[in-house]
Amino acid sequence: MPAPKRRPSETTVLIVDDDADLKPDAIVLDLAMPRVDGWTVLKHLRESSWTNQIPIVVVSAVHDVRDEAMRTGADAYLAKPCAPDIVWMQINALLRMRHQRTSLAFS
């Protein structure tokens, strides 16, 4: 599946109510967000029973935090700048791995 085309200045934010039936397949998290600490978001996502099984791809311009991001709960780490197609490929790889684990569990 090709990566969606977006304008460079376009920002997409998904806000989901905890009570909603909608659940993302994956989360891309920038650690350096303007109003929220990405580390805190990552910890909360991993502590929540609602989101703890969702794959998280962390992106950051700080190159020496990869190990800490993985220890904190990231499933993948990408250094910025990172082309959107690389992010898309990483998400697809994580989703394939999750599907394979699920398939093995039920076989």
Image (tube, helix red, strand yellow):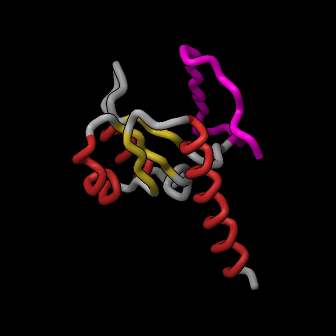
Left of 22 or right of it: where is 76? left
Asked if residue 97 is positioned above or below residue 105 in the image, the reply reads above
> In this orientation, which residue lies closer to the viewer: 83 or 102?
83
Q: Residue at x 60, y 33 (%)?
A: 17
Identify the residue at image location x=56%, y=18%.
8
Residue sticking out furthest to the left: 64
Q: Nearer the viewer, residue 40 or 20?
A: 40
Q: Position of residue 16 (x, y in %)?
A: 61, 32
Which residues are drawn in magenta?
A: 1-22
Left-right relation of 23 to 48: right
**Residue 76: which quarter of the image?**
bottom left
Q: Residue 31 occupies which quadrant of the picture?
A: top left
Relative to 96, does residue 58 appear above or below in the rendering? above
Q: State the residue at coordinates (71%, 32%).
A: 4
Residue 27: horizontal and vertical position, in percent?
Answer: 54, 43
Q: Main secondary structure of the magenta part?
A: loop
Q: Position of residue 103 (x, y in %)?
A: 72, 75
Residue 9 magenta: yes
Instruction: Tell me which residue sits at (68%, 72%) in the image.
Output: 100
